[in-house]
Image (cartoon, grey):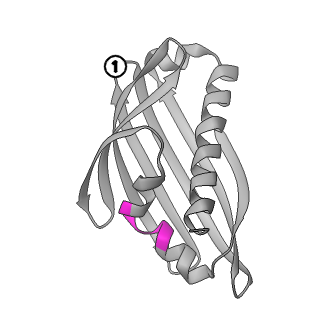
Amino acid sequence: MEFKGQFDVKADRHTVFSFISDIEKITSLIPDVQSREKVNETSSKLIVKAGQSAIKGKFNLLLEILKKVEDQSIEISAKGSGATGSLDIKARYDISSNSPDSTTVNWIVDFTIGGMVATMGSRIINNTAEKYISVLTESFRKAFER
């Protein structure tokens, strides 16, 4: 499934890129993280509680920064599994300046799920994914309002 959108941040392009390319800052935005372990500068292991209604569980994820183009774009992946299924997420963020202190982030998230989670039906899966994406986007925006 693919989701895409954009949001604006009150910060310059370099500041936004620096934030989104910092593995520790990225993982601090992810909701329901129960533990995180930085592996190196571009990857982190996470245990995340996720799901919907009766099919909720913990997922062991490896989050990795795959590709960076300084002050322009970044590609990230998250792969993992839990008792209720598996996740394979790929995300791309394109960063552009609106003005010296305003930046637009265009994003595309593509994810594949397997196991019991995949049997929930596309409407429930879409709603759950949209909820998590909304929380991440809002957390990212708020990080620059502090």
Q: Residue at x 70, y 88 (%)?
A: 100
Point 41% across, 28% down: residue: 86
Please state if 10 lies on the left or on the right of 136 as rendered: right
Q: Position of residue 65 (x, y in %)?
A: 40, 61
Q: Residue at x 57, y 59 (%)?
A: 140
* Kind of residue sitting beneath label 1: Ala
**Residue count near mark 1 (Cα–Cα under 10 Å), binned few <14, some 14–19, many ≥20:** some
Q: Is 99 left or right of 117, judged from the image as shown?
A: right
The one of 54 and 86 positioned closer to us in this rendering: 54
Q: Which quadrant is the N terminus positioned in? A: top right
Q: From the viewer's perspective, is 122 left or right of 92?
A: right
Give 39 or 12, whichever is nearer the viewer: 12
What is the x, y in percent for residue 33?
38, 41
Viewer-proximal residue among 19 and 40: 19
Q: Quadrant of residue 58?
A: top left
Secondary structure category for the residue under label 1: loop
Q: Which picture quadrant has residue 132? A: top right
Query: What is the magenta segment's predominant secondary structure?
Result: helix
Query: Does the segment drawn in magenta span residue 23?
Result: yes
**Magenta stretch, residue numbers:** 19-24
Q: What residue appears at the point 57 percent right and 49 percent down from the top-left corner? A: 136
Residue 22's place in the image compared with 117, above or below, is below
Residue 123 picture location, percent across and down: 70, 21
Residue that lies at the very extreme toward the bottom in this rendered image: 100
Location of the C terminus (image quadrant): bottom right
Q: Residue furthest right?
A: 98
45 sits left or right of 11 in the view: left
- Residue at label 1? 83
